[in-house]
Image: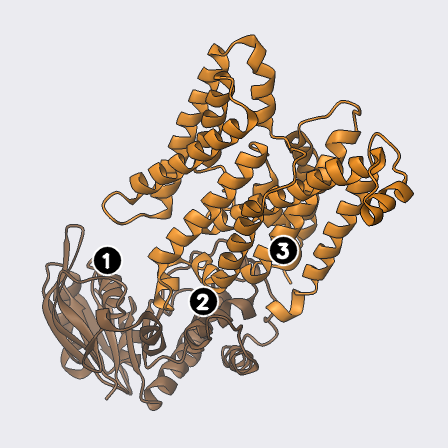
Chain colours: A brown, B orange
Amino acid sequence: MTELSAHDLHIEIGDVVVCRDLCATFKPGQVWTVLGPNGVGKSTLLRTLAGLYQPTAGRVAFDGQPLVDMPRRERARQIGILFQDHADVFPLTVTETVLTGRHPWCSPLQGESAVDLERVDQVLDEMGLDGFQDRNLFSLSGGERRRVDLAALAVQDSAVLMLDEPSNHLDPRHQVTLLGGMIDKWRRARRTVVMVLHDINLALRFSDYLIFLYGDGKASQGLVTEMATEAHFSTLYDQPMGRYQTNDRDLFFPL
Amino acid sequence: MPARRAYFLPLLFLGVLVAAGFSLAIGTIEVDWQQVYQGVVAGRPSLHYEVVMGIRLPRALNAFLVGGMLAVAGALMQVLLRNPLADPYVLGVSGGASVGALLAIMLGWAEVGVSGAAAVGALLSLLVVFSLARGAGHWSSTRLLLTGVVMAAGWGAMVSFLLAVSPEAHLRGMLFWLMGDLTERLPGGFRVGLLALGLGVSVYVARSLNLLATGEQRAASLGVNTVLLRAILYFTAGVLTASAVTLAGAIGFVGLVVPHIVRLVIGADHRLVVPGSLLAGGTLLIVSDLAARTIMAPNQLPVGIVTAFIGVPAFLFLLRRSATPRS
């Protein structure tokens, strides 16, 4: 069982208590979304689950092994993360950038192999970035750049994928077909997706489970069907929310 | 990707050889190669043999070493500080070395003593900045940069102070040291070893450098021990800089501009940028030194002036050319 689990997780960052005694098990094939108002620490929770931030108390484990005890390289093969924004200093090409995602799989002394390159080309094609291989990163639009980030995460081939606001900069078509398509593919491949989204309706559309962070250390979680009510969202965002029912899905909006 | 643009490296190496060839051949006296050949083969001493093997060759070797060290240190520093404007001196290494060297000159120490004092000053500065920047255990690029910049400013004030109070007789020597100049003694094996070690370490961590350049958190998420990597970068760059500065003074511009020129030509993959910077930095300094000692011959200019005169227009030209529209 390649499952990621949080045990009595207590996370603080600065003055913010992100969560107290959070327990959750993220199983293969499940898609989770963390929702909550600005500044409650959604990204910090994601980074903690990825082993990049040390919780004040409690632990995160993969396959029962605490992340802190996992060798870095092994952890990077199992858990990948897409960051909210990027911080490149020097302009690599698209191919070079996506190849960095293969780092955990390459031996320290050898460069990337033909297999790695093939994987990169395959993913670039899936992302609609064929022909972008030699483009300079700095010449890309925001949405193209986001797709490059997604591609770099995809080639990492990790069992768990953390996505921090993956829909940023993507147009509606790319949100639904590309991002939605990737998530479906990962679900079918029995991988685990945990993401942060601001768009409630995308979250409902893509995920099976939701975690709410309220900002005072309180958190709640459950199946999308249980969690998605006007009352819950109104409390979560401290903003009256309405529901619009269509044939195949409910849409939520601020009143 | 290495395979695609790796052919630039042999070209750059060829550039080093050509530059070195010119550097041996050109100077105030016209070399009679027959005599040099006799000197090498038959061990027959002559003026021409002495000029080429005893003066020009060591200068060219020193120029290559210093240029290579500064350029590699600059490339590492730019990644470490996540700042394209970083150069080997930005964290105060050269400032520490300068204060050490000037004090030694004021005290009338011999050249060896001056170099030793410069080395002590540089290493001292390196350690002080490292321990101050660590603070509560965590050091961000910004904190490191600010600590280093403030430290460098402090050293700068010390240098001005020493220049202000030093007797007239020492001033010229002090200024020449500050502007940087190359000696005519054969470089020791120690320095060659340092450069080789620095290059080896840098190339070994080069793939991690690429990751670090895409973001520290991202590098960590891909399995890089960023704390260790940054310490390695800091000390590798620092020791290379200290060694270069001790040998030749604070020669400016090589460490800032060469890595950028290399990135503009070869691309930003540090597996190529690091060796490319070594070769290009070495070439730039050999050529600069050749110019420094021939333009106003028999007078010699400080080589640091020439590196700027060559480096600035070359960089601006490449920058303009690379500013092409999309695709």
Mark-to-mark CA distance, 3 and 2: 31 Å
Decide if residue B24 is on the left or right side of residue B246. Answer: right
**B124 and B107: which one is in front?**
B107
Residue B275, given in percent of the width and then of the height, sits at 60, 57
Task: Tell me which chain the residue with mark 3 is part of.
Answer: B
In the rendered image, the vertical position of residue B47 relative to residue A10, given as above or below: above
Q: Residue at x 12, y 65 (%)?
A: A235
For residue A231, say whether it is visible.
no
For the residues beneath circles 1 and 3, the answer to whether they share a chain is no
In the rendered image, the vertical position of residue B105 relative to residue A81, given as above or below: above
Task: Tell me which chain the residue with mark 2 is part of.
Answer: A
Residue B7, given in percent of the width and then of the height, sits at 70, 65
Label 2: few (<14), some (14–19) or many (≥20) C-alpha neighbours in 10 Å: many
In the rendered image, the vertical position of residue A192 relative to residue A53, given as above or below: below
**Mark 2: which secondary structure?**
helix
Residue B41, given in percent of the width and then of the height, sits at 83, 49
